Amino acid sequence: MSTAIDFTYQYGFQSGVELTAGGKPLLSLATCGADHSRPHFFDGRVRKPRLMGEMLYVLSDIVRTHFFLPRPALLDPVLTSNEHLLRLEGFSGCCGVYARVDLPESLFDGECHGRGTTNVDFNAPMRNALLRVRDQDEVQFSVGTDEVVLGKDEDRIVEKKVKLPLRWLKGFSEVQAYQTRLELKMEVGAADALAFVRSLPKASKPKMPSYAVSAARSIRLSQRPQAGAVPLLGTHRVKVIEPLLVRARSLKVWADDSSGASAWEVCFETGSFFLLISPDVFRGFSGEGQLLSALAAPPSDLIIAKVRASLKWQSQLDANQLAQNLGLDAADIEAALAVLGSRGLAGFDASSQHYFHRELPFDLATVEDMQPRLLNARKLIADGKVMRLDGDGLYAVQGTGTTHRVRLSEGLSNCTCPWFSKYQGQRGPCKHVLAASLINDDDMSMDVQ
């Protein structure tokens, strides 16, 4: 099985900052949809150009970086035109760092021409130009263009042929599962946050984590775990937000205690920059299996289809409101959104605790085919290797030369296999737990009928 797919970005022009006929700077982002369309989403003026330029620059840093190997990453971010804001999302080449820039409508004076999601061209000249943008400049901003590029202008087409790693595509779906479990651990003022980030080592690859701990109204680094502490491996990944803290209002620190993933949200008076890092420098989000339970026991196709039909580029999806509108349970709505998120059709915002509609411009419809544990679990069932035992939630699953015992519970299900013993559920359920869960769900469905 191939570990990457061939993909070609086709842009109508190269993103950059140029002077208009009136002498005003114009930041133009070139677009490229999944079908190589070039949507035109926005034209207007930026009210805080330096802030936006710095956020886009840091985002470009992340998408072009592999955080544990000296190799370049050439994968462009995606932009979504939602109601009330523009969102840009990017993923590092090592699949261990996710970033999102939220640009609310109050940051602009202009006109929105449409809704949707597109790749946007990030290149070295534009990256360098972003650092020259100043607040005193009356910067114009466009996402796409209404210009039609005819056949005679084909020499203007900018193509980037890349290999999209399957783990990169899987990681983009896995990060949504982490964000739904994040808990806010602390919020500190920008000055204290800046002092903390500046104190972090530039290159840190220890085997044992350090911990970010709350200290009065500040934050400090400790080598000892304690209540409310946020584990941190690879401090250089957090240092990327340092330039943003100069103009920030505060820093929110989030954590998923079950996995060790953490998020660092730089909050401004207008807009925010959200950084999510994997539990370890060498662990990308793509291999964690956090979506496996949702994919193994999804709601019915009819429920997923109803929820999918209700997605209209909302910046917040209210599960309770959708449940009321569709005549469904809110739990079914949340489960359907988790499945749609795995297909690239929804993202999650930890701050608002809501999903949002966006459609990644890649084909993620076969995401289940990229989940070998789920495929192996279904094979165990097909081969008749899963048996329900006496006792609530107890199963026997035949392995290689042995039989594993699985106990299902509402909290953490467990298994006697070596894989579960090693990771204790931190990387999602093992194939034996998945197989038992599938059988259990089928049995419950039959009981209901």
Image (cartoon, helix red, strand yellow):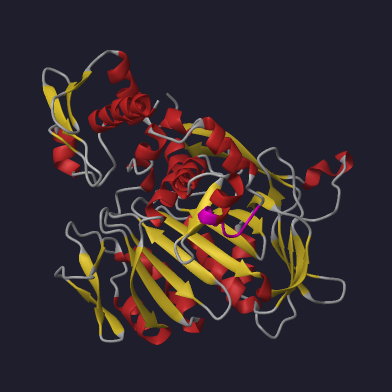
The front one of 262 and 21 is 262
Does 315 appear in magenta?
yes
The front one of 94 and 41 is 41
Left or right, 212 with reference to 313: left
Whether 113 is drawn above or below 52: the answer is: above
| Type of secondary structure dominating the magenta stretch | loop
Does 233 appear in magenta?
no
Residue 63 in picture, x, y percent from top left: 50, 55
Is residue 86 visible in this depiction of the protein?
A: yes
Whether 145 is drawn above or below 49: the answer is: above
Left or right, 106 with reference to 217: right
Residue 444 in picture, x, y percent from top left: 33, 29
Q: Residue at left 75%, top 62%?
A: 42
Q: Residue at left 87%, top 72%?
A: 21
Quarter that holds the N terminus: top left
Residue 193 in picture, x, y percent from top left: 37, 80
Whether 108 is drawn above or below 80: the answer is: below
Left or right, 29 with reference to 308: right
**What are the residue bounds of the magenta stretch?**
313-320
Quarter that holds the C terminus: top left
Q: Residue at left 75%, top 50%?
A: 39
